Image: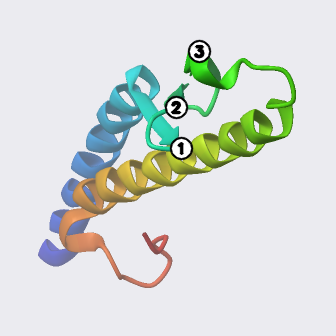
Amino acid sequence: MKDLGSIMKQAQAMQEKLRTAQAELARAEIDGAAGGGMVSLTLTGDGALIRVTIDDSLLAPGEGEIIADLFIAAHADARRKLETRHSEMMREVAGPLAGLPGMPKF
């Protein structure tokens, strides 16, 4: 039963690390960009869009479709970075329990 006690302690430690990681991720701000930085945006750790910056050169008549495409690309860039950060944090939290049956794959 000594092994079970050790596993329980590891699980409790992992739960605390998970709470800490989730709080850190919630405070995170992730930037995404497209068009060489002509369009950039910022997402919070939960994926909420909080900031958009558009280069003035794109604000000419007829550039709406380009702006929309760059906006979508910048958002995709930020989401990829957010998902990467989330996965890295969860792998770190799982530590030696990562990969055990029943544990999520990161």
Secondary element type, mark 3? helix
Looking at the rendered structure, the number of numbered marks drawn on it comes to 3
Residue 10 spot, x, y in % from top left: 21, 59
| Mark 1 to mark 3 CA distance (whole Å) | 14 Å
Q: CA distance from mark 2 to mark 1?
A: 6 Å
**Image height of 104 relative to 71, above or below:** below
Q: Amino acid at mark 2?
A: Met
Q: Quadrant of the C terminus?
A: bottom left
Residue at 44% across / 43% down in the picture? 36
Q: Which residue lies at the image location 30% right of the left edge and 63% below the top edge?
A: 91
Q: At numbered mark 1, what does the secondary structure look like: helix, strand or loop?
A: strand
Q: Which residue is mark 1?
A: 34
Is mark 2 in CB contact (under 8 Å) with mark 1? yes
Q: Is residue 1 left or right of residue 104?
A: left
Q: Point out the tag, 2 or 3, that comes first from the N-terminus.
A: 2
Residue 87: image location, x then y, percent: 40, 58
Residue annotated with mark 3: 56
Can see residue 96? Answer: yes
**10 Å neighbourhood of mark 3: few (<14), some, or many (≥20)?**
few
**Residue at position x 66%, y 25% in the image:** 58
- Residue 24 drawn at (x, y percent): 33, 28
Whether the residues at callouts 2 and 3 have beta carbons within 8 Å, the answer is: no
Mark 2: few, some, or many residues within 10 Å (few <14, many ≥20)?
some
Residue 1 located left or right of residue 32: left
Which of the pair 49/21 is nearer the observer? 49
What amino acid is at disc 1?
A: Ala
> At x 36% / y 82%, what residue is drawn?
100
Amino acid at dot 3 = Asp
**82 with respect to 54 (left or right):** left
* Residue beneath disc 2: 38
Give the number of the mark in front: 1 or 3. Answer: 3
Find residue 88 and report its image quarter. bottom left
